[in-house]
Image (cartoon, grey):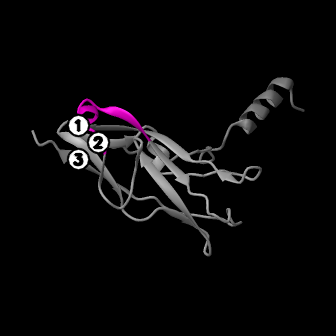
Amino acid sequence: MFNARALFAFIIVGLLPAPGWAAVERETFEVYVNIPTPQFYVLPVDPQLVQREQVLNYNPVISELSSLRAPFDVKNTGGAIGARLEAEPFLYNGNDRIDLRVTFNGQELSLDHTEVVSVLDAKPGKRVHLEIAAIKPQDDYRPGRYFGTVHMVFDAIASRF
């Protein structure tokens, strides 16, 4: 018959993990950094802005889409900053299209190059805003799941001084 001390020792030994039965958890993280040159950069304040799909919320009561607004830090020690769209911005569901208006620092962007930050603001650096807004169709929004991509190109405009 077991005495109490032997029974306790048996229970403790039985609860200990056997060699090779260790519990293991592993985590994997992808890490990166984008360090811009101190002379020129156009960077979203939230670095995940360009890595995540952005949602324009639909309000069915007033039939409106919310706009995307995001701050950017900009700088060009050698002059102004220009921008343009690489392609027309729109959302598409396979049948219907919703055009988008893109403004950067209050300047509407098009396929043509536009100065969006002046020399005076670009040289010391500044925080400016991007806005992407839907242009409501004349016959209202049609039901569906819409997707699109906005391609912007930013350039350092050299000062002429």
- The residue lying toward the viewer, choosing from 37 and 134, is 134
Residue assigned mark 1: 119
Residue beneath the point at 86% across and 26% down: 3
| 114 lies left or right of 133 | left
Q: Earlier in the sequence, mark 3 or mark 1?
A: 1
- Measuring from the top left, give residue 20's x and y in whole percent: 59, 48
Vertical relation: 48 (above or below) 90: above
- The residue lying toward the viewer, choosing from 44 and 26, is 44
Q: Distance from label 3 to label 2 (Cα)?
A: 9 Å
Q: Which mark is in front, 1 or 2?
A: 1
Q: Quadrant of residue 22?
A: top right
Q: Mark 3 belongs to which amino acid?
A: Ala
Vertical relation: 94 (above or below) 140: below
- Measuring from the top left, give residue 106's x and y in whole percent: 42, 42
**Element under label 3?**
strand
The quarter of the image holding the N terminus is top right
- Magenta range is 116-129
The quarter of the image holding the C terminus is top left
- Measuring from the top left, give residue 87's x and y in whole percent: 40, 65
Q: Which mark is in front, 3 or 2?
A: 3
- Measuring from the top left, give residue 62's x and y in whole percent: 73, 50
Q: Earlier in the sequence, mark 1 or mark 2?
A: 2
Residue 156's disc number: 3
Q: Distance from label 1 to label 2 (Cα)?
A: 14 Å
Q: Mark 2 belongs to which amino acid?
A: Tyr
Residue furthest out toward the top: 5
Residue 41's disc number: 2
Q: Quadrant of residue 23?
A: top right
Q: Distance from label 3 to label 1 (Cα)?
A: 10 Å
